[in-house]
Amino acid sequence: MPAPAHPQESSRLDILRQYKIIDTNPEQDYDDITALASYICDAPIALISLVELNRQWFKSKVGLNCSETSRDVSFCSHAILTPELMVVENALADERFANNPLVTGFPGIRFYAGMPLVSPNGHAVGTLCVIDHQPRSLSPAQAQALETLAHQVVAQMELRLALGKLSAQAQALATANQALHQTNFDLDARVKARTSELLAANRRYESLNAELTRSNQELAHLAYVISHDLQEPLRKVRNYSDLLKKRYSNQLDERADKYMGHMASSITRMTQLLKDLLAYSRISRGECRYRPVALSPLLQKVIGELQTKIEQTQATIRFPSELPIVEGNEAKLHQLLHNLIDNSLKFRSDAPPQIDVQAIAVGQFWQISIADNGIGIAPEFLERIFAVFQRLHVREAYEGTGIGLALCKRIVERHGGQIWVESTPGKGATFHVTLPQKAQL
C-alpha cells in the first residue's frame, strides 16, 4: 500500500533540494554510518534513504546493490510521516506491506526499522534504516543507537550545506576582491593620468596667467603713459585754440566761429577722457592702502561737491544719519560714491531726482545701495554698462566718457567686493556695492 502524501511535501522537497545531495558520489563518512548501523543492529542491510517526489535514492548502502526504488513501494515513505522510529517486525503480518513487491520479491524484506532524517526546521527528508530477511525486533539499545546515528547523518548533511555556502561566499568574496583590485588598479591609473593632465593644465594656466598679468601691466602702463603724456600737447592745443578764438573771433565769419567752438568742445571732451583714463590706469597699477573709512562724512563731502548740480536738478538725496565704517582706501571710495551719485543726477527722468542711500550688513561685508527714480536701464545692458568706454546714449543726450562705471567696478574689485545693478526701464535703477567691514582689532 503506497504511503499517503507528506503533509508538508512541498517544503520537505525544497529542503531536500537545498542539501544538493541527490545523485552525488559515495562518501566515506556516510558509508561509515551505514556500516555502523548494520553492525549495531545486526542487520544484513542498512541504508541512508532520501525520499524524492517519485523515488527513494540511497546515498549509502550496505547489503544491497541497487541505488534506488520507486517511492510507491518504499517503506521509508511511510517512516517520514512521523518523527519517531518506525519498526515493522514482520512485514507479512502488516497489511501496509504484506503485498509489497519488496516483501514478496527481492530483497525479501521481513523486518524494517527506519529513523527519519529530520532537518533542523522539522522536515523529514529520508531515513536511516536497517532491514532483515527474518522477522525480528530491536533492543532498546539498538533503537537508541539507530536514532543517534540518524542525527549524525543530518549533521553531516548540514555540515556539507554550510561548507557549500561558505565556499560560495568565499568564491564570491574572491571574485569581488579581484574586481575591487582591478577597479583600484584602473582607478589608480586614471588618477595618475588625470593628475598628469591637471598638472599640465596648471602649468599652462600659470603660464597664461603670468602672460595675462604681464599684458595687463603693460596695457595699464601704456594707458598711463598715453593719458599722462598726451595731456601736455593737448594743453598746448587748448591754449592755441583759446588764443585763436580771442584774437580772431571778430575777424572771421560765423562758420569759422562755429568750427572753433567745435574744436574747443572736442578738446574739453578729450581732456576729460584722458583724466578718466589716467584715473582708471592708476586704480589698476597702484597699491591701495586700506584703513577704516567712515562713509557718512565721505558722502557729505560728495554731496557738497555736487551741490550745484543738485540744486539745478532740484534733486533730493536721502540717507541714514549714520552710515557704516568700512575697510578701504578713502580716496578711491570717495571717487566711487561721487561717480554713482553723479550718475543718478545725470541719467534723470523729467521728474526731479530722488536718490536713496542705504546700508545693510551681509556676512563680513556692508552692502551699500544707491537707488534713484531716473530713466533706468534695459535688462540686456545691465552687465554691459561696466565695460570701459561703454555708452548707452549719444553724447548729445548725456555727457560723459563711458569710463565712470568701469572705474567704479575696478575700485570695488580692488576692495574685494562686488558691484551690480537692478533696474526697470523708466522706473529708475539701484546700484549695489559690497565693501569689507571694518577690521576687528
Image (cartoon, rainbow, N blue to C red):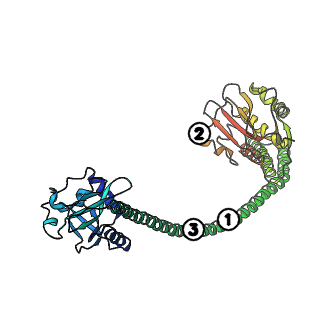
Mark 2 is on which residue type? Pro
Q: Which of the two discs, 2 and 1, labels the residue nearer the N terminus?
A: 1
**Mark 2 or 1, closer to the camera:** 1
The residue identified by callout 3 is 190
Q: Residue at x 74, y 58 (%)?
A: 216
**Viewer-closest of 278 and 27:** 27
* Tag 3–tag 1 contact (CB < 8 Å): no
The answer for how far apart the CA atoms under marks 3 and 2 are is: 45 Å
Residue 259 in sight: no
Q: Which numbered disc flags the more N-terminal residue, 3 or 2?
A: 3
Of labels 3 and 1, the one closer to you: 3
Mark 2 burial class by Cα count in 10 Å: few <14, some 14-19, many 20+: few
Residue 415: x percent and y percent? 78, 46
Q: Which mark is residue 202?
A: 1
Residue 382: in sight, yes or no?
yes
> What's the CA distance linking mark 2 and mark 1?
37 Å
Q: Secondary structure at mark 1?
A: helix
Q: What residue is disc 2 on?
A: 379
Amino acid on which the number 1 mark rests in the picture: Asn
Left/right placement of residue 93 relative to residue 422 reads left
Task: Say what amino acid the circle numbered 3 marks.
Answer: Arg
State whether residue 233 is above or below residue 32: above
In terms of image quadrants, where is residue 85? bottom left
Q: What residue appears at the point 52 percent right and 67 percent down from the top-left corner?
A: 177
Residue nearer the viewer, 202 or 288: 202
Q: Position of residue 14 (x, y in %)?
A: 31, 57
Q: Is residue 405 left or right of residue 275?
A: left
Question: Between disc 3 and disc 1, whose residue precedes?
Answer: 3
What is the spatial separation of the Cα atoms under label 3 and label 1, in whole angstroms? 18 Å
> Which quarter shows the C terminus?
top right
Q: Is residue 54 above or below residue 380?
A: below
